[in-house]
């Protein structure tokens, strides 16, 4: 059995397209021969957290495989039970399965954000709970490097709105959507906006990846050795984190440093995407290997330090989410401003 997520994209690119490919729903058992994909942990019937949008989400994933030439795709399902403790702040980590250059596996975004979420749970027992990490998100550059998945922006937004609505129905009121993949972030912002509009008695937040706040950025700058552009994608940061978390999925002899991004004053590549302009040009313009950055600067020790900083950043965010929710509920109950006017809509 070949584990798809442990491969690099060039290894995916040369896979025999006649091999059977299995996409498990939950803990489904797959045959010994063929390629097994990361499991879809929830959303589907029988998962314990079923939402209507699961089918469109799945169809986009399978459609991408068929576009890449895989002719023998199978979806395997098995009952699962996703339990969500809705009293604490609920972490919803979303990773992705996509290319990270020649030297990193497809699982980088999932492995890292899962480790961050787990670190927060360990640091805050009883104050946070979490869903299983979702290994599929949104990649609008999917056609550029075969092997990358794309759940589709609209399907992704619908799916996570439905997940939040179901968790709200069960009593959840405080949520933190964590993303390990940059392509998810703008869509998660939309989800947060819609959900917040519908449910003023809840507090739902997201953030740009991790190490994006003031303390996180300071930690990045303190330990980095690459120049600007060295952190973009599959660069010094993600390679260091993987050397710490899953060194067997890192191939330093295959690293290709790519710093030739088409940069201007208001649009350039870094971990926190820089400049005033927001755009989505073809990745073919800026990278040959699929990486943006300087993976050769990575070390496992940097990865350990940056993971600890990322966990602390998220711990601080969880505390803020709890404080925001508490203070806003208090104002609502006390009739603050227009809440006391009687003409608000909830």
Image (spheres, rainbow, N blue to C red):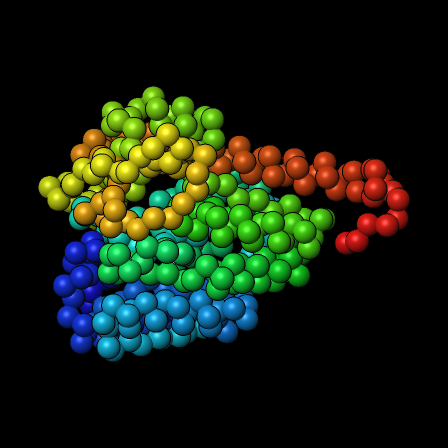
Examine the rendered structure and indicate whether residue 298 appears above or below residue 234. above
Q: Relative to 208, is 344 above or below? A: below
Horizontal side, residue 190 vs residue 181: left or right: right
Q: Quadrant of the C terminus?
A: bottom right
Kindly identify the residue that appears in the image at 31 percent across and 58 percent down. 142
Tell me what residue is drawn at x 28 percent, y 60 percent: 143
Residue nearest the viewer, comparing 334 with 248:
334
Residue plotted at (16% across, 66% down): 15
Residue nearest the observer in this picture, 243 or 236? 236
Q: Give the residue drawn at x 24%, y 50%.
A: 284
Q: Is residue 130 visible?
A: no
How far from the left and from the top, in percent, is residue 112?
35, 44
Query: Across the whole image, how many numbered discs are drawn on residues?
Result: 0
- Residue 318 falls in which quadrant of the image? top right
Question: Residue 11: where, in percent of width, then height?
Answer: 16, 58
The quarter of the displayed image where residue 229 is located? top left
Q: Which quarter shows the N terminus? A: bottom left
Nearer-the-camera pick, 11 or 287: 287
| Residue that protrudes farthest toward the right in the picture | 341
Furthest toward the left, the residue is: 253
Outermost residue, top side: 222
Nearest the camera: 184 or 123? 184
Residue 263 pos. (x, y %): 31, 34
- Name the side, left or right, on which 277 lies relative to 199: left
Residue 126 horizontal/vertical position (percent): 57, 43
Whether residue 12 can be seen here = yes
> Is 249 left, or right, of 163 in this rendering?
left
């Amino acid at each position: 059995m070949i584990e798809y997520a442990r491969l690099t994209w060039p290894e995916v690119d040369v896979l025999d397209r006649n091999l059977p490919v299995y996409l498990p729903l939950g803990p489904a058992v797959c045959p010994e021969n063929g390629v097994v994909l990361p499991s879809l942990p929830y959303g589907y019937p029988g998962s314990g957290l079923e939402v209507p949008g699961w089918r469109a989400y799945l169809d986009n994933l399978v459609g991408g495989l068929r576009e890449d030439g895989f002719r023998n795709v199978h979806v395997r399902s098995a009952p699962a039970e996703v339990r969500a403790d809705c009293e604490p702040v609920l972490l919803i980590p979303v990773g992705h399965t996509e290319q990270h250059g020649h030297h990193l596996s497809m699982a980088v975004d999932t492995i890292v954000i899962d480790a961050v979420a787990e670190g927060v749970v360990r640091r805050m027992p009883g104050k946070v709970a979490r869903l299983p990490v979702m290994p599929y998100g949104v990649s609008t550059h999917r056609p550029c490097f075969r092997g990358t998945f794309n759940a589709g922006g609209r399907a992704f937004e619908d799916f996570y709105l439905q997940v939040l609505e179901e968790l709200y129905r069960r009593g959840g009121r405080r949520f933190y959507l964590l993303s390990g993949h940059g392509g998810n972030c703008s869509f998660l912002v939309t989800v947060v906006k819609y959900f917040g509009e519908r449910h003023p008695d809840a507090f739902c937040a997201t953030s740009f990846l991790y190490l994006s706040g003031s303390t996180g950025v300071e930690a990045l700058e303190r330990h980095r050795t690459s120049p600007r552009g060295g952190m973009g994608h599959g660069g010094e940061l993600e390679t260091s984190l993987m050397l710490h978390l899953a060194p067997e999925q890192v191939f330093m002899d295959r690293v290709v440093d790519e710093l030739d991004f088409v940069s201007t004053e208001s649009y350039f590549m870094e971990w926190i995407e820089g400049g005033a302009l927001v755009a989505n040009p073809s990745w073919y313009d800026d990278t040959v290997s699929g990486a943006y950055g300087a993976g050769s600067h990575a070390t496992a020790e940097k990865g350990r330090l940056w993971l600890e900083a990322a966990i602390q950043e998220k711990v601080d965010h969880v505390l803020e989410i709890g404080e925001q929710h508490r203070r806003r509920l208090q104002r609502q109950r006390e009739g603050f401003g227009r809440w006391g006017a009687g003409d608000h809509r909830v």
